[in-house]
Image: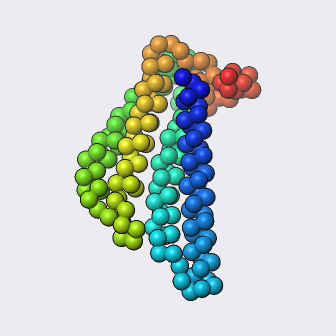
Amino acid sequence: MKIAVDIFYKLLEYLLVILMTAMVVMVFSNVVMRYFFNSGLMMSDELSRFCFVWVTFIGAVVTFRENAHLGIETLVQRFGRTGRLVCMAMTQLLVMFCAAIFFWGTWQQSDINASMRAPVSGLSMIWVYGIGYFTGGMIFIISALRLLNILLGRVTDAEIAAFANEYDDELIGERAQ
């Protein structure tokens, strides 16, 4: 199971690279064509913006999985193990709540977005805004699994230290395994 999950996230990282590359190629080509030929690709501006939206929201999922989002550890560092676990659990509950609202908001807007068309490409705007389903759903699932690990007592000292932003060479090695 862990291997399949790792492969999934590796594929997401490759997708991010592909989307970033597409953005660079489209924008660069458009700049070159405007500079040298006084013309451009009309869809490149629009599609590069769509790619940017997808990069942002897929990147948020990858970043959340890697615990790389910003955090405020000043208070958490003062707590012991139990206090940190309580803070971890409360954090996961809050993130789950926000992710559920995000998913629900996407759901509420999906009929409107599906009926709207992009001005140049004519693509349904659900292709842009529908990424909220993926982002909200994935962040909710990741958070729920973390909360489950906390409740079952399967949180390692390395994970607790990472939550409090206390990195030690030994703990980093344990976390990587």
Q: Residue furthest bottom?
A: 38
The residue depicted at 40 percent of the width and 56 percent of the height is 128
Can residue 171 be seen?
no
The residue depicted at 49 percent of the width and 18 percent of the height is 149
Where is residue 147? Give x, y as percent. 45, 23
Left-right relation of 90 to 32: left
Where is residue 7? Give x, y as percent. 59, 34
Asked if residue 55 is positioned above or below residue 80 in the image, the reply reads below
The residue depicted at 61 percent of the width and 32 percent of the height is 165
Asked if residue 60 is positioned above or below residue 3 in the image, the reply reads below
Question: Who is closer to the viewer here, 37 or 84?
Answer: 37
Q: Residue furthest right?
A: 169
- Choose top left, top right, bottom left or bottom right for residue 98: top left
The residue depicted at 47 percent of the width and 30 percent of the height is 142
Question: Who is closer to the viewer here, 130 or 165?
Answer: 130
Question: Who is closer to the viewer here, 29 or 155?
Answer: 29
Q: For the N terminus, which image quadrant?
A: top right
The figure's colour scheme reads rainbow
Where is residue 90? Give x, y as percent. 42, 26
Where is residue 103? Give x, y as percent. 34, 41
Question: Who is closer to the viewer here, 111 or 147?
Answer: 111
Q: Residue furthest top?
A: 153
Q: For the C terminus, which image quadrant?
A: top right
Can residue 114 be seen?
yes
Left-right relation of 109 to 69: left
Asked if residue 38 is positioned above or below residue 158 in the image, the reply reads below
Q: How many marks?
A: 0
